[in-house]
Amino acid sequence: MANASRQAAWEFWGTELKRRREDTGLSQEALGRMVFVSGGYIGQFEQAIRKPQLDVAGRIDEVLQTDGFFERMWRRLIGASPFEAYFAAVAELEALATKICEFESSLIPGLLQTPAYAREVMLSAAPFAPEEELNEKVAARLERAQIFKGPAEPEYWAIIHETALRVPVGGADQMAEQLEHVAALVHSRRVMLQVIPYTQGAHPVMSHSMKLMEFSDAPPTVYTEGLFWGQLLDDPAMVQRATATYDLLRAAALSPKASLSLIESAAESYRNP
């Protein structure tokens, strides 16, 4: 399903939500309380600005007595997304965020990847994937990076482990291109990036990735990911714990200036082994 038609379908989802909510005489705030989100969230769902999570769609069906309509349509729309089901909502939220802070332990974050690097990462995870499917997934990942070509938002801060610089993904030329791309984004002042060096040793979250997102009109969220799973959370206590963990990672990292020097040095070592 093309992006335009998928967005049109979400708009229909929101229109139906508004119509059926009003048929029951519920305000956005009242429905929000009943499905455990804010009234503002309901308004954003109705305008197709923000996409609900599956459990919220299910609770809406229960409250509005719509016989599973919203959950069934959610599953169909998420199934049509080029992203894994657990990541589809995250990709939508990135475009709405005013600030994104993320940590990756062994790879360059997806928002910063070049086409060649992204392709190698995806091919290593699915070596038998059809070419058309692989190309679609790479294109979808690159499309997410369009957020850096618009206005000043979002503010983007990434922390990576030195492993991401040293483990070659593809050939030396691909790694050099990838690291030069990251350095260029840093020089453009659209990205703030820090590297945790090997000398800092292990950290409890090294085996996971983490993404914190803030919004102008909604509570912050945290997304964590492991092998074949991902979890998007907006519980205030969990977001607070994730923020504290991110602060510890930042404290363990090199300064932005020293990190940039390390990235450029690594790129040069791939260009001139």
Image: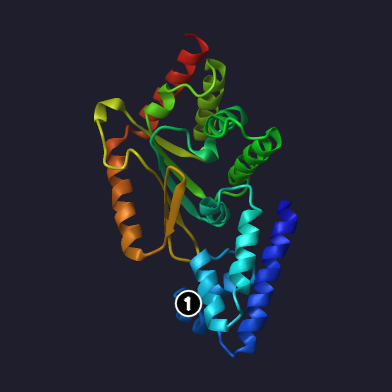
Q: Disc 1 residue type?
A: Val
**Image coords of residue 149 (percent x, y):** 62, 43
Image color mode: rainbow
Residue at 50 percent of width and 28 percent of height: 183
Name the quadrant containing residue 220.
Answer: bottom left
Residue located at (67% from left, 39% from top): 133
- Residue at 61% over, 64% down: 74
Taking depth in this image into account, of 49 and 251 the one nearest to the observer is: 49
* Closer-to-camera residue (22/40): 22
- On screen, residue 3 versus residue 202, left or right, reads right
Residue 193, image x and y in percent? 43, 36
Confirm whether residue 102 shows in the render.
yes
- In the rendered image, the vertical position of residue 140 relative to residue 160, given as above or below: below
Local packing at callout 1 (Cα closer than 10 Å; few below 14, some 14-19, many 20+) is some
Quadrant of res 221: bottom left
Of residue 24 and residue 240, the one placed in the foreground of this image is 24
Report the number of discs: 1
Q: Specify the farthest residue to the top.
A: 273
Q: Residue furthest bottom?
A: 25
Q: Secondary structure at mark 1?
A: helix
Question: Residue at (73%, 63%) from the top-left corner?
Answer: 8
Q: Nearer the viewer, residue 193 or 177?
A: 177
Q: Position of residue 36 (x, y in %)?
A: 44, 75
Whether residue 84 is situated above or below residue 24 in the rendered picture: above
Residue 217 appears in the figure: no
- Residue for badge 1: 35
